[in-house]
Image: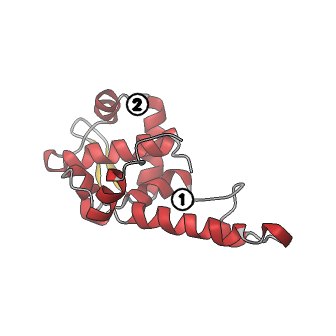
Amino acid sequence: MRISARADYAVRAVLELAVRQTNGPVKAEEIAAVQGIPHKFLEGILGDLRRAGIVDSRRGGGGGYRLARDAADITVADVIRAVDGPIVSVRGERPTGLAYTGTAQPLLPLWIALRANVRRILEGVTLADLAADSLPEPVRALAAEPGAWENP
């Protein structure tokens, strides 16, 4: 599984909003500058997040973006789906839409299990968790495994 630049930027942008949520709306230019995200690219991402109901926008001098819901009610999976669609796909299709025959039949439950594990992690972490630098214990435990930081 790969996390696209679009998904990475989206999560970073909404995390910036979560951390600043008590300060009122934040301008896209500020988010782009602080997070090192190309401004035009970020505008498109914020539009997708607005259409998905994750952020709200306000025009004008005191305008900008803010979270549309409480940070505890927005998961990382919500953000990724808003900008990239399904979390795990195989050749652009959802695993449940695939069919294999012959010796390839064991692949389908493998892809389904992969999707279930990825969803379990991404749906189990909220923006509030990230903003508080407090990942859920199962995620911290996975990240603490000896091989987690190695590239085979």
Q: Is residue 90 left or right of residue 121?
A: right
* Residue in view at x 40 percent, y 31 percent: 37
Amino acid type at mark 2: Ile
Circle 1 sits on which residue? 87
Circle 2 sits on which residue? 37
Callout 2 secondary element: loop
Q: Position of residue 143 (x, y in %)?
A: 35, 52
Quarter where residue 122 is shown: bottom left
Count the numbered circles shown.
2
Q: Is residue 126 left or right of residue 121?
A: left
Q: Position of residue 151 (x, y in %)?
A: 50, 40
Name the one closer to the observer, 117 or 130: 117
Q: Position of residue 29 (x, y in %)?
A: 33, 30
Amino acid type at mark 1: Ile
Name the one closer to the observer, 90 or 22: 90
Between marks 2 and 1, how big is the CA–CA gap? 22 Å
